[in-house]
Image (cartoon, coloured by chain):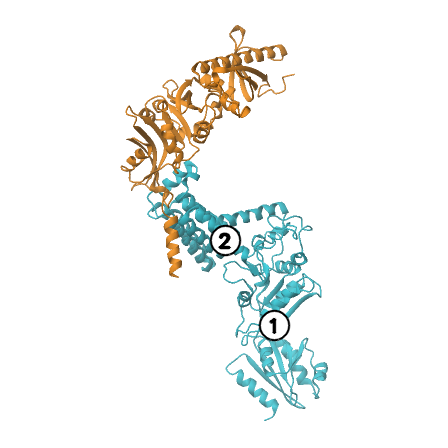
Amino acid sequence: MKRRILALVLALCMFTSGCFSYRDINKLLIVVATIIDVDAEDNIILYLEVFKPYRSEQSAAGKGQRLLYKSTAPTLLEAIRDLNLGTSMKLNFTQNKTLIFTKRAAEKGLDYFIDFLNRDQEFILRQFMYIFEQSPEQLLNLKLAEEEYVGIYLYEFPLNQGASAKRHVTRLDDYLNNRLKGEQINVLPLLQLSSEHMDSQLRINGAVVLKDDKYAGQMTIDETAIYNLMTGEIRTGTILVPLDGGNIITLEIVGSKLENNIAYDGDSVYVTKNIKIKTTFASTHKPLELNQPDVRKQIEAKAEALVKEKCSKLFEMWKEKRVDAFLFKNIFEIRYPREKLKVEDIIEITELDTQVEISIEGSSDVTDFYE
Amino acid sequence: MDMHEKTIKYIKQQFQNNFDIVYREIQTDKGVVYVIFDGIMCDNVFVSDFVLRPIMECKELGDNLDQIVERILPAKTVTYVDTVEIAFVKILSGDAVIIFPGIQRMIACDAKGYSVRGIDVPITETVLKGPREGFTEEVITSITQIRRRIKTPKLKFEPFQKGAKSNNLVVLSYIEGEAPQRLVDLVRRTINDIEDDYVIYSNIIEERLKAKHTPFDTVGYSEKPDIVASKLAEGRVVIFINGTPMVIWVPYFFIELFQTPDDYYMNKYIANIARLLRWMAFALATLLPGFYIALVCYHTNLVPTIFTFRIAAARAGIPFPTSVEVVMLFLFFMLIREGSVRLPQPLGSSISIVGALILGDALVSSALASNITLIIIALSSICSFLVPRTYGALSFWNFIIIVFSSLVGLLGFYVSFIMLVSHVAGLDSCGYPYLYPFGTLKVFNFKDILIRDDLDKISNNLFERNEDA
């Protein structure tokens, strides 16, 4: 009997202690956004947006309170420990789904922080990652019209399908995978504050490309859309086609397919990207004879030329910067697993041929007008 | 004093201080004939017209008992009684016992005439469609209800007088050729082995037949003749006990917890939805509180963010840990349930008002419990009402799962769930696996477990297939 009791006590001690011991949910400070910055001395500045449950004496129902914390320390864990010194309850990161790095932190290199984010048991892998250009205080003090918490707002951002063409979404698990492949390229969405868009003050305004966990350059919002097309990550979006006479028509992307072909002759790498885009006719500023096959063919040809030109420009931009933003190295390693390149940057010897094929399927209202 | 006088004296001695026993002495050519009967239990008109009057009007009684019965007694059921002990049982069962002078054997005439509860709608087993009648406490009436449904000489009713002092009638019933012989023998042996002085309710036999150390019922019971008739047709062995409308049968399987008469009377699609709901309700009722504790106290990362906020805010200011809160609410619900079951029906509504007000509102507003925990426990309790026969077992296992989940989170939840499954899988009902037909894939056509197929496709006799295997 004594042995059994002893075994039970030991089992309880073993199971009911440690990081994941019993903890009531209302006794936690639930972190919803983590912002990581660095100072001039390379110290980590950690900002947290926290949900704290509380119930006042007057109120019969419990409420949530938004708290903001800041801490500076040489390492991330130290910064978190430091914050716990000033809180009545333990900070809990199991609901943290938004990881924001300042541009300064990205320039310093995310490898500085990523090990802890990967290693610590409390951080989950499905956190969305962002780069923010301005001051973290500005971001945290922002009063969002749609949502009280910046962290939740940014967690729900990727769910907005309408914006998917122009933003590039990366989660921590994707990031950790990508940094082990090819030239260790990662693309994170770039957040900016804007006063031009009334209530929509926090916006995704392009993307930042990281190479070896360090900032390597950034793209505008339109370039990000083209980038997404070239990497096959687009789901919806629009293509604006200017026509003669000042008319602009809008084609809505309903689907796209990308096929990569790669060839290596020992000196150069030849990449062919076949992009097939299905669109539907969304709008025109002036009347158009859409029943005429010639008109449709003309629109398709113009759109194809437009997309092709933008693809080339974007490729040239990254080639100049010697950053393999299009992940050619990944494709190359899959196609030629035993070949070693003579150059360090694959993009230096890469020649890109982009083939764009756009088809207009019809409008959403009238589906049988075509043919 | 001759033998005749001694017997009368002995009977009178034994029935001393019993006002209901009536002794009639009738002078005949052979001497005094004694008619002894229970004046309350017997039909007095019947006794007067068909027992007393013929003897009184008889001029020549004779010495042969068979001739007396043939010539004088027009009573419908007449049996010979050889011992005084049997005579006691007969008198107390509502028979009129006649003692003739100079004849050692006695005669008992069935003259039962006591009032019994009429056939009524059973309140514990209501149906939307299908027969409404239920058994009564009178075993004879119950047997006729079965006979009316199954008219075959193969349907057997074996009587047993059980209880050294109660001498209550226990009837073993089965259909010869349908019920496995070893099952019939086992139940017969079990009934014969009963040596209690008083056998007045079904649980005395039930406890001898059911699996030990488990809160799950491994003996079935019902007060509806249509259910019992169908169980007999499936090859089960049924036991009637005089004095209770609950008829028990063995073996009883786990899947029967989820079957209701309406499953077979109603449109199968509607019935199947209801049955799936019962399976789901069983899972929710058993697992939900434990799963909630495991998620909320250990694995918050598995809870959606907005829901985490809601739970955390709802629990803010609650002085007890979640596990204590869950157990506390669980006990409150058990108290209310127990209270409402025991309370007389007119007062039943008052307990629901008190329960709803105390649990639903006051607990939350006084910050003794959170509304989300309340919803979890309420949902679990409502689900348990869908499978009412598992209530005791559910409460027991619910508590075990809550304790394990509180100690080790999801790990404890899984461990306790496996324990529950292994416990149920380890049970047997009179030698048949309780989880049958699970685990017998090859011999059962699975048409009546999670959902019911067409009635002509589901198995009629479960044992036949099983024993062939």
Residue at position x 36%, y 50% in the image: A13
Query: Residue B405: x and y, percent?
Result: 43, 49
| Type of amino acid at the residue the image marks with label 1 | Phe
Same chain under badges 2 and 1? The reply is yes
Q: Picture quarter containing residue B32?
A: bottom right
User: Is A154 situated left or right of A331 in this image?
Assistant: left
Give the colour of chain B: cyan
Circle 1 sits on which residue?
B160
Q: How many marks?
A: 2
Mark 2: few, some, or many residues within 10 Å (few <14, many ≥20)?
A: some
Q: Is B155 above or below relative to B66? A: above
Task: Rate crowding at label 1 as few (under 14), some (14 to 19) or many (20 or more) other CA atoms within 10 Å.
Answer: some
Closest to the camera, between mark 2 and mark 1, is: 2
Residue at x 44%, y 33% (from the top left corner): A126
The residue labelled by disc 2 is B420
- Of A102 and B164, nearer the camera is A102
Q: Nearer the viewer, residue B332 or B72?
A: B332
Report the chain shown in orange: A
Q: Indicate the secondary structure of the residue bearing disc 1.
A: strand
